[in-house]
Amino acid sequence: MRLARVLPAHLYFLWHAPRTYVRTLRYAFQHRNRQASLRALVRWTLNGGRQRKQLSTADLQNLLLHFVVVMPFAALIRREEYTWMHAAFANTPSSFALLTWKLTGVPYSVSAHAMDLFITPEILAEKLNNARFVATCNHYNKSYLEEYYPEVRQDNIHPVYHGTDLQRFAAAERNGKAAPPVLLAVGRLVRKKGLAVLLRAGLLLKERGVAFQIWIVGEGPERPRLEMFCRIHHLHETVKFYGACAPEEIRSFYQKATLFVLPCVQDENGDRDGIPNVIAEAMAMRLPVISSYLSAIPELVNNRVTGRLLAPNDPDELAAVIQELLENPALAKRMGAMGRKRVEELFDSRKTLRELIALFEERIAPVADAPAGT
């Protein structure tokens, strides 16, 4: 944030719409994160917003902070006479959209995914109810909102799957004949991916004399802990960490893998995946998938048909299922073929994109329908 940009934007609204500005400031103050530090916000602002480390997680989720920094965006929306905004997530982006709507009257829509619903719920109901529509990437999220946020208008929540490029992830290109067999996991190295569970299952497989290798593609804060586990338990020659890779490289990993294993868990803070995109990509490549009965994953992975779903945090069961599929390649191949059909039915990005476009076409309306400050 630069004061040279932010301060003139605040002055712009104070001059052109003083009542709306004050009303929105009052709203932001009343709905600020009570765990946030006003002193830290003032110090950070006077410092020009250059030291993000000065702010805690609570500070970063503070609506009052969002009010301070949203002004250049809101001024741009007003000056350029934009007629619609779309917030790509239900946390900070939708806070920006809500505040800008209050300042300008320009309507907005929201996409909701996972963490933005589960662990950053500040004024969530108001942000979603004031949106022209909310597109969420699975049916589980809609049910979650219905249960925990009954004040949210359910007719405004529209499940639309992310979708996968089925031409790019072409099923016919996979060979999966690596020796030893490859258990592939792709994703950010964070706790909710369940990679620690996978490594514990790998240790059990090693003790049973099962031949395998684990390839982990991705980067994240859990990597040092996972690598330490491998060194302590002498898995460092069996488990390979490839770090962050380009999309084309990731596709080559799918081609060479035997099974795709992502035993997702719910983190201590409540965060969990919806449907990881990598599961859909793996299924599109005819990889049999092993994952968890968690959140929206069962909407895509049909247990014992397109793959296997297990209880979270159960390395013993995970090891047994991995061994079963490695010893039964015909079953694994059938599951992979059924997985491809499943993503063709539900996750074809051409279909899901048409659904999202239809939502926009239905809901976009003139700015006059949403008067400023309402």
Image (cartoon, rainbow, N blue to C red):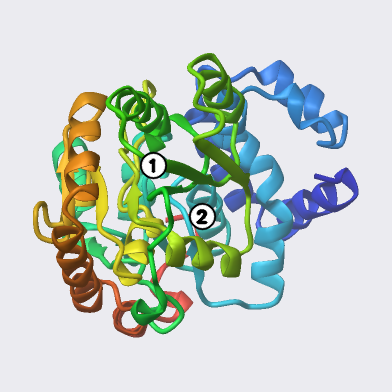
Q: Kindly tell me whether residue 270 is visible in this rendering.
A: yes
User: As drawn, which residue projects farthest toward the right?
Assistant: 4
Residue 206 in percent (x, y) is at 36, 27
Kindly identify the residue that appears in the image at 31 percent across and 44 percent down: 125
Residue 6 in percent (x, y) is at 80, 48
As displayed, is residue 103 above or below residue 190? below
Foreground residue among 23 and 322: 322
Q: Is residue 371 found left or right of 305 in the rendered image?
A: right
Give the foreground label among 2 and 1.
1
Foreground residue among 21 and 269: 269
Q: Which quadrant, please, contains the C terminus?
A: bottom left
Q: Is residue 239 found left or right of 144 in the rendered image?
A: right
Kindly identify the residue that appears in the image at 41 percent across and 40 percent down: 115
Please name the amino acid that badge 2 sits on.
Lys
Q: How far apart are marks 2 and 1 (CA)?
A: 57 Å
Q: Quadrant of residue 336?
A: bottom left
As displayed, is residue 329 above or below residue 147? below
- The numbered mark at residue 212 is 1
As displayed, is residue 78 above or below residue 34? below
Disc 2: which residue? 102
Q: Which quadrant, please, contains the N terminus?
A: top right
Residue 216 in percent (x, y) is at 50, 44
Foreground residue among 319 and 120: 319
Q: Is residue 173 found left or right of 34 in the rendered image?
A: left
Kindly identify the residue that appears in the image at 49 percent across and 60 percent down: 88
Kindly identify the residue that appears in the image at 58 percent across and 52 percent down: 20
**Quick one: label 2 or label 1, which is nearer the N terminus?**
2
Residue 350 in percent (x, y) is at 35, 84
Mark 2 neighbour class, 10 Å CA radius: few under 14, some 14 to 19, many 20 or more: many
